[in-house]
Amino acid sequence: MPQSLAAVFVHVVFSTKHRQPWISEKLAPRLHAYMGGILRNHNCIALEIGGVEDHVHLLVSLGRTTSIAEMVGVVKANSTNWVPEGFPPLRDFCWQNGYRAFSVSASNLEIVTQYIRNQAEHHRTMSFQDEFRGLLRRHSLEWDERYVWD
């Protein structure tokens, strides 16, 4: 089989440093579009990007040679540099150190897409912490509360 093909879909979540509410309604569409461009330049496809003022969700089709860690690293590094350039009042903008990545089957892409699109509505009734604990439980991941929120 000479051709390499891959269909790897990942739902990634990460927060701003100390969960600062830096992602305003004005910044969000530009930031999400910029992140999509970063992904495209690294042979990945942004299927959906969304979130609220203190965290972001990405649904990504990984390029066949790109690891999750590499993809997240390049998105976070490049967007951290871009935000203060375009939005000088956000000169301290940065992301938290960690991230959470969850595999998504092709049959669930639309469900996850809608979930990401409805983040603002979703967070009117549920905190990020409760949302996140639910994601961890759904994916059978264990965690230590002491290390998960910074």
Image (cartoon, rainbow, N blue to C red):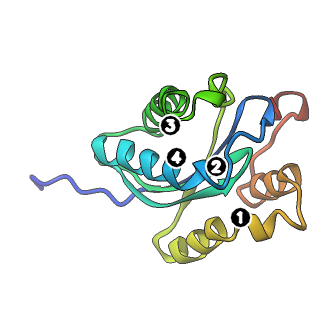
Query: Among all residues in the image, which is located at the extreme top?
Result: 92
Which amino acid does the dot numbered 4 rest on? Leu
> What residue lies at 45% left-to-right and 55% top-to-bottom?
60
Q: Report the quarter where the N terminus lies.
A: bottom left
Which amino acid does the dot numbered 2 rest on? Val
Q: Earlier in the sequence, mark 3 or mark 4?
A: 4
Compute the Cα span from label 3 to label 2: 12 Å
Which amino acid does the dot numbered 3 rest on? Val
Q: Earlier in the sequence, mark 1 or mark 2?
A: 2
Work out whether residue 102 can be spotted: no
Label 1: how many Cα within 10 Å (few below 14, some 14–19, many 20+)? some
Residue 85 percent location from the top left of the image = 49, 28
- The kind of secondary structure element at disc 1 is helix
- The quarter of the displayed image where residue 7 is located: bottom left
Q: Which residue is mark 1?
A: 119
> What residue lies at 75% left-to-right and 61% top-to-bottom?
138
> What residue lies at 63% left-to-right and 65% top-to-bottom?
116
Does residue 18 appear to the left or right of 64 in the view shown? right
Label 3: how many Cα within 10 Å (few below 14, some 14–19, many 20+)? some
**Marker disc for residue 56:** 2
Does residue 59 appear to the left or right of 141 in the view shown? left
Circle 1 or circle 4, nearest the eye: 4
Compute the Cα span from label 3 to label 4: 15 Å
**Marker disc for residue 31:** 4
**Marker disc for residue 72:** 3
Circle 4 or circle 2, nearest the eye: 4
Residue 95 in the image: above or below residue 123: above
Residue 134 percent location from the top left of the image = 82, 58
